[in-house]
Image (spheres, rainbow, N blue to C red):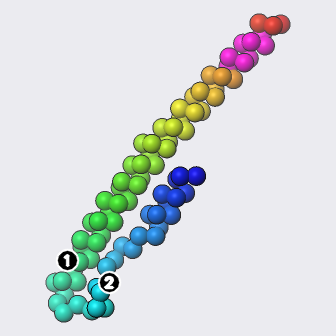
Amino acid sequence: MDINKILYDMRSKQTFKIPANGRYNKIGDFIADQKNEREGIKTHYNDRVEEIISNRLAKLVEAVGESRSLKEEEDLEQAKMG
C-alpha cells in the first residue's frame, strides 16, 4: 500500500545532521546545522502527512461511499424482483 511506503520514508529520515568530517569547530555551527536539519525534516513530515490525508484518505472515503451506494441499489433490485 502506498501509505506504508510513505510512513517508511518518514521513519527513515534522520532528524539530526552529522558533519562530513565528524566534528564541529564551533558550537554555533552545530546549532545552526541542527536547526536547519530539523526544519527540513519538519517540512518533509508535513508534506507526507498532507499527502496521506488529502490524497489517500479522500480516495478511501470516495470508495466507501461508492460501495455503500452500490449495496443500497442491490437491495432495491432484490426488493423489486420480489
Q: Amino acid at mark 1?
A: Ala
Question: Is 46 left or right of 56, judged from the image as shown?
Answer: left
Q: Quadrant of residue 76?
A: top right
| Quarter occupied by the C terminus | top right
Residue 74 belongs to the span the image colors magenta: yes
Task: Classify 74 as above or below 67.
Answer: above
Where residue 42 appears, x then y in whole percent?
A: 32, 62
**Which residue position holds label 2?**
18
x, y (%) of residue 10?
44, 63
Q: Secondary structure at mark 1?
A: helix
Secondary structure at numbered mark 2: loop
Mark seen at residue 32: 1
Residue 49 sits above or below residue 72 on the image: below
Q: Residue furthest right?
A: 82
Q: Is residue 56 left or right of residue 50?
A: right
Please name the residue shown 68% across and 19% down the image.
Answer: 72
Q: Is residue 28 depicted above or below 37 in this figure? A: below
Image position, residue 52 (x, y; %): 46, 49
Look at 39% across and 49% down and name the residue there: 50
In this picture, residue 34 sits left or right of residue 73: left
